[in-house]
Amino acid sequence: MAKERGEKIVATNRRARHDYLIEDTYEAGMVLSGTEVKSLREGRASLVDGYAFIDAGEAWLDAVHIPEYTEGTWNNHAPRRKRKLLLHKQQIVKISHKTAQGGYTLVPLQIYFHDGRAKVEIAVAKGKREFDKRQALREKTDKREAERAMRSRNRLGE
């Protein structure tokens, strides 16, 4: 069987970019069972309620929903179990120091395959306030309207 190349995105957490101000991002491997990998290869996962945390010097991913593999037998996995993340010790120490400060948390941004291996992108993030969310949304719509106006002006000029 040929070795996989490139990246294949399985799931993204679009809500995290809206609700949090992303400071640092890290790529981490995951300890998965066989049926979890097969379910991910089918493109089935949800990061909606997921979060990550550091416990006793180890990084964990919790509440991420990877549904049971349809062809699995009695040894199928639990859909929402804690999964260990594979990070370097220095990265874990750096993340734990950052999250020990007030207001910072670890959120998963996306799950993907990189050269055939399942990875998760986690971010050290700070929660946005309501007015920050409104301001970001306003800036996004202003930028979209400006691009639309320039596009229509360029069409008229030709």
Image (tube, helix red, strand yellow):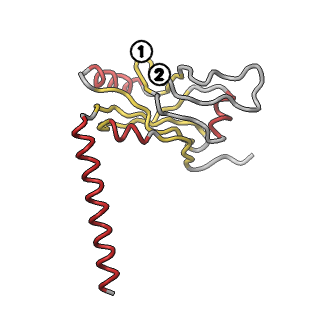
Q: Is residue 104 above or below residue 26?
A: above
Residue topped by disc 1: 55
Q: Give percent across and percent down for residue 7.
A: 55, 48
**Residue lying farthest to the bottom in this orientation:** 158
Amino acid type, label 1: Asp
For the residues bearing labels 1 and 2, Cβ distance under 8 angstroms: yes
Rate crowding at label 2 as few (under 14), some (14 to 19) or many (20 or more) other CA atoms within 10 Å.
some
Q: Residue at x 64, y 47 (%)?
A: 4
What residue type is disc 2 on? Trp
Name the residue carrying label 2.
Answer: 60
Identify the residue at image location x=49%, y=26%: 85
Question: Which tag, 1 or 2, sits closer to the chain's start?
Answer: 1
User: Where does residue 5 sit, x and y in percent of width and height?
Assistant: 60, 49
Quarter of the view holding residue 79: top right
Crowd around label 1: few <14 · some 14–19 · many ≥20 (10 Å)? few
Q: Residue at x 75, y 46 (%)?
A: 1
| Cα–Cα gap, marks 1 and 2 | 7 Å
Q: Quadrant of residue 18?
A: top left
